[in-house]
Amino acid sequence: MKKLTRRSFIKTTTKASIAAAIIPALPWGCTNHTGADKSGYFESGFGINDNLCQKVLARALYRGGDFADLYFEHTIRNWLILEDGHVNQAYSTVALGVGIRTVKGDQVGYGFSQELTESAMLAAASTAATIADSTPKDPASQFVKQKLENYYPLETLLTSIPLESKLPLVQSANDKCFALSPLIIKVNAQFHDEQKRILVVTSDGTKAEDLLPKNYLYASVVAEKDGKRERAGWNLGGRWDFSFYTPAVVDEIANTAVDRVNLLFDAVQPPAGEMPIVLGPGVTGILLHEAIGHGMEADFNRKGISTFCTMIGKKVAEPFVTIIDDGTNRNLPGSINVDDEGTPGQKTVLVDNGILSSYMHDKISARYYKLEPTGNGRRESYEHYIQPRMRNTYMLPGQAKPEDVIKNVKKGIYIQSVSNGQVKIGEGDFAFYVSQGRMIEDGKLTAPIKDVNIMGNGPKMLRNITLLADDFEMSRGGGGACGKGGQAVPVGFGQPTCLVKSMTVGGLKN
């Protein structure tokens, strides 16, 4: 294959990705390479061979450094947006480049280049190398390719899906929402798909390639009744092949969005104060992710920021509570065949029967704690450095029935979903807006609620979990991302119905 310059490649791939929305197939999509089975993409397309990687890694270590790594990325993203009955946006973006990291102790030097030429990469490596000031270190003389599992196989490359196949999804979501309720006055339907190829090469001899899909279908609706307007939405997605988006999936998105918005017309504001909270299954796992999960990322503990920094081996919850962070769930947004520093995807038990058993580690924190990395080294793109980040974080089910969990509450609230969370990692304090929920009165679900916030402390909430149901669910949405250090990465979360004996309820949505 003829080697392309960055300028000609970006021009070609941008045209190709737009053409993919118009014609049935692209030349590069016809071979139907799938998931992690495709190898040699960056070598055949850009001349990124082992000799060149050794040369760039040697430059990254020429002032010393404990280790260095290269992260090559080529990502194509497509958006299709329908609003007011018309497709008013359809566009693509392309990202191509390499990030080069040199690590000395717990300090990081970082450089990146949008040009995959030898001179540009050597210049970026020189920038990364300035973190160290000692004897040069040689990278491994050869690289061993990682044998990876594939948790998100593709039948067809997403770049080969034509626009004519995507249009019926947003049009059908739009039409179904309007047909479900005469109260609907506005619908916004979106389909987003992303295809990211990465290559990780490390100075200690690791080489790993992956192809990560990410996509979702979303519908938001505005309804009006007696001069009053409400808004709600729903999405489904993850790391799926395009074949996931069946008529049944479109129906579920439309039905859920319309049901949620119509329910809000009957919603009341619950009384404020301390009271028991029942968290419903699935999507409320975002509370677990935000209020507890971030505090278990190793960098916050290595730096003494997290309240969990001295709690390894100690009780943090009741014995029936087990919390896992997992990169190996099939097709979920946070699943990864390999993390962004070459560690294969794996499962990490954070809380084991109430005992804090592990943090989430990248290579830097793993070396600090004298442990193996857990596969949590992640970054938004080649322009960003690695941080310990969650993947799919969830709490295992208990043995109670969901209705029995609710029966244990005389007066409280049931939370179906939350949004707009704010968390202070150090103290563990959080506040979330309840977007869907109900009152619990005498052990029964009653009136829907809205315009309410819940507030609490993550570690305290963990200790206050008193009952878990057997209805474990993972959130099936694909549109969200987790922010940390100015970077956003896709994550998943889930849990069973869960009783927290006391949290603070109050406040109006402005």
Image (tube, rainbow, N blue to C red):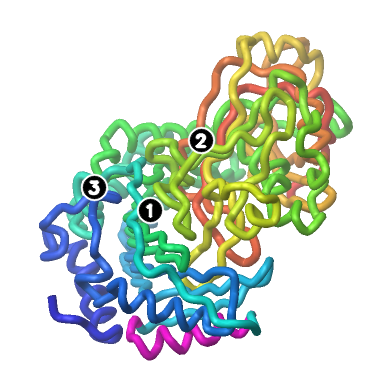
Front tag of 3 and 2: 2
Q: Do the residues labelled 1 and 3 touch (CB within 8 Å)?
A: no
Q: Position of residue 382 (x, y in %)?
A: 46, 70
Q: Residue at x 47, y 83 (%)?
A: 59
Question: For numbered disc 3, what is the local secondary structure?
Answer: helix
Q: Mark 2 points at which residue?
A: 475
- Asked if one can make out residue 448 in the rendered structure from this viewpoint, the answer is no
In the image, 379: left or right of 328? right
Is residue 127 shown in magenta? yes
Q: Mark 1 points at which residue?
A: 190
Kind of residue indicated by mark 2: Ser
Question: For numbered disc 1, what is the local secondary structure?
Answer: strand
**Residue 100: mark:** none
In the image, 383: left or right of 166? right
The vertical placement of 315 against 28, above or below, is: above
Q: Which residue is drawn at 34% across and 58% down?
A: 144
Q: Give the range drawn in magenta.
A: 116-131
Mark earlier in primary sequence (1, 3): 3
Q: Which residue lies furthest to the right in this view?
A: 273
Q: Name the residue under label 3.
A: 168
Neighbor class of circle 1 (other Cα within 10 Å; few <14, some 14-19, many 20+) is many
Q: Position of residue 276 (x, y in %)?
A: 80, 24
Is residue 201 shown in magenta? no
Kind of residue indicated by mark 1: Gln
Q: Residue at x 40, y 47 (%)?
A: 337
Neighbor class of circle 3 (other Cα within 10 Å; few <14, some 14-19, many 20+) is few
In the image, 402: left or right of 473? right
- Asked if one can make out residue 447 in the rendered structure from this viewpoint, the answer is yes
